[in-house]
Image (tube, rainbow, N blue to C red):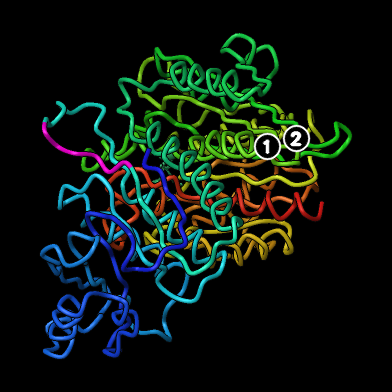
């Protein structure tokens, strides 16, 4: 991955192939230029005066310096209106700069700090660059002669070393996000539950975490009826993946993170229509996010305890599949009437949640899942749905999501929603009808979390770029790694004040 260096440097001193300078919309004064060679300054001034470039968000213009200065080219990059500038805008603009530099075939480039220096700005600019340069090319022939960007310098007006450590920390988090993307993007023929489990085991080995993978027969013996039922229809057996990271004293209660990893969701006997079914390879993204958060906290050596549990299955139709009408006894002892085999995510999460809570007595539980199409109907493809039993935890996540750009909005879990999942023949049923589908799915899960603070994040719309996804420089096509940055922030906050 690209290296980000934070340097104190004046803009007329940095030897670089490309210097990116952010310009706010309709701010033509451009005070920095006074340090540039007069000819280069004149050229920039001309561009600005002519209004060929106004600094609108996303626009850019290239200026060749023709040997008059240490930079070969300058790119003016529009930052949009100053009043609207946020860390998220910085992330998007830095990502755009990286994309353009890549198109230009640069091996290295530099960016001037976009706005007033603070930690959030340096973090966002680092993230924007490193997230945008991600690409999934494992299955493509190498394009020869194409340079890769190896180094990016962010030029700032301070020599405090703290900014480099901010960038280094952001780099570790982005490596984890890109890890989530790498496994999220894998095609389903190369990522069945067994492969996901072995990826998790190598991860644990590399970062010194405890790991355990529970196989099909053991799951059966343990009474994990939900995971076994969904896994039955496939020749690729289910796995329950557990990672334990201990960064704080052993007696400190851990966070429990649970992520849905359906490596391919055909719907099972209640089979899905064919259109876009290929996208159901992304139905493992909740699990990928959880594995990635474990990687991030371990690589950053955060002083917190975290357990990651990833139930993984392939949901297939076959003569051994579970069926509509089946009544399944879950790990918790509750019975579930299956009315649609396509509502499989909640079946596997229910067992993972109940098992995790019984085994680890966590202080809080967060699950992530591409759980319902209804979450996309409710909030679109750019906002994840938060539903939970703990106001404080939900509020914390929602507020952090404003900073990370991983947008989340809370939906209410009113008691009435439980009516919709009552069953005639079992304790509950696995679907609640169309109205409020994202909430009834959460109501189902709430049956398996006892009274531990719990928040569920439905990432059906945000886990990969899909119909309705806003184009964002730092989210290239495919899996986004949604949730990793926000959850790491939450755990970092906790490290400071447990
Ligand atoms: N993985 C899907 C949800 C999904 C659908 C995510 C489309 C992203 C895009 C989930 O397993 C599912 O099929 N849910 C059903 C639930 C229904 C049967 C109650 C759905 O949303 O249609
Ligand atoms: Mn499904
Ligand atoms: Zn699914």
Mark number displayed over residue 301 = 1
SS type, badge 2: loop
Looking at the rendered structure, the number of numbered marks drawn on it comes to 2
Q: Which residues are magenta?
A: 145-150
Question: Nearest the camera: 226 or 245?
Answer: 245
Going by the image, does 344 lie left or right of 359? left
Cβ–Cβ under 8 Å for marks 1 and 2: yes
Q: Which residue is mark 2?
A: 247
Is residue 469 at least partly visible in the picture? no
User: Is 477 located above or below residue 119 in the figure?
Assistant: above
Is residue 387 at least partly visible in the picture? yes
Q: CA distance from mark 1 to mark 2?
A: 6 Å
Residue at the (62%, 31%) spot, across then down: 309
Task: Locate residue 270: give its quadrant.
Answer: top left
Q: Quadrant of ligand 1?
A: top left
Q: Position of residue 454 (x, y in %)?
A: 70, 50
Q: Name the quadrant of the N terminus.
A: top left
Most common secondary structure along the magenta stretch: loop
Residue at the (16%, 71%) spot, across then down: 61
Determine the residue located farthest toward the top in the rendered image: 217
Q: Does the magenta-highlighted stretch encompass residue 260?
A: no
């Amino acid at each position: 991955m690209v290296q980000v260096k934070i340097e104190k440097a004046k803009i007329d001193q940095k030897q670089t192939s490309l210097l990116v300078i952010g310009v706010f919309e309709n701010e033509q004064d451009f005070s920095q230029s006074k340090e540039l060679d007069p000819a280069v300054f004149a050229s920039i001034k001309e561009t600005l005066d002519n209004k060929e470039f106004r600094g609108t968000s996303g626009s850019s213009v290239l200026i060749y310096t023709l040997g008059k200065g240490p930079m070969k080219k300058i790119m003016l990059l529009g930052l949009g209106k100053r009043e609207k500038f946020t860390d998220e805008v910085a992330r998007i603009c830095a990502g755009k700069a990286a994309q353009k530099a890549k198109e230009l075939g640069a091996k290295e480039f530099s960016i001037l700090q976009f706005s007033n220096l603070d930690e959030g700005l340096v973090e966002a600019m680092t993230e924007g660059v490193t997230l945008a340069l991600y690409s999934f090319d494992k299955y493509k022939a190498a394009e020869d002669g194409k340079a890769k960007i190896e180094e990016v310098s962010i030029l700032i007006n301070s020599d405090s070393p703290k900014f480099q450590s901010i960038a280094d920390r952001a780099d570790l988090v982005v490596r984890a996000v890109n890890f989530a993307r790498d496994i999220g993007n894998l095609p389903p023929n190369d990522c069945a539950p067994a492969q996901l489990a072995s990826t998790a085991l190598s991860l644990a080995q590399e970062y010194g975490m405890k790991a355990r993978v529970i196989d099909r027969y053991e799951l059966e013996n343990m009474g994990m009826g939900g995971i076994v039922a969904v896994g039955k229809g496939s020749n690729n057996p289910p796995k329950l993946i557990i990672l334990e990271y201990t960064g704080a004293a052993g007696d400190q209660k851990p966070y429990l993170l649970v992520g849905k990893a359906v490596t391919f969701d055909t719907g099972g006997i209640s089979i899905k229509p064919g259109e876009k079914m290929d996208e159901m390879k992304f139905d493992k993204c909740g699990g990928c996010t959880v594995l990635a958060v474990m990687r991030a906290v371990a690589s950053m050596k955060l002083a917190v305890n975290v357990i990651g549990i990833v139930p993984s299955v392939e949901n297939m139709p076959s003569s051994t599949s579970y069926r509509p009408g089946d009544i399944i006894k879950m790990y918790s002892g509750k019975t579930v009437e299956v009315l649609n085999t396509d509502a499989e995510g909640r079946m596997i999460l229910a067992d993972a949640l109940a098992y995790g809570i019984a085994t680890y007595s966590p202080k809080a539980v967060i699950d992530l899942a591409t759980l319902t199409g209804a979450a996309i109907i409710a909030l679109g493809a750019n906002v994840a749905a938060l539903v939970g039993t703990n106001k404080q935890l939900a509020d914390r996540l929602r507020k952090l999501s404003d900073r990370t750009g991983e947008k989340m909005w809370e939906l209410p879990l009113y008691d009435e929603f439980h009516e919709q999942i009552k069953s005639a023949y079992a304790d509950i049923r696995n679907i609640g009808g169309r109205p409020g589908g994202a909430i009834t799915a959460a109501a189902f899960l709430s049956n398996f979390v006892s009274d531990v603070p719990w928040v569920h994040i439905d990432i059906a719309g945000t886990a990969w770029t899909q119909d309705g996804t806003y184009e964002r420089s730092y989210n290239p096509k495919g899996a986004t790694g949604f949730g990793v940055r926000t959850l790491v922030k939450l755990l970092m906050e906790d490290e400071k004040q447990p």
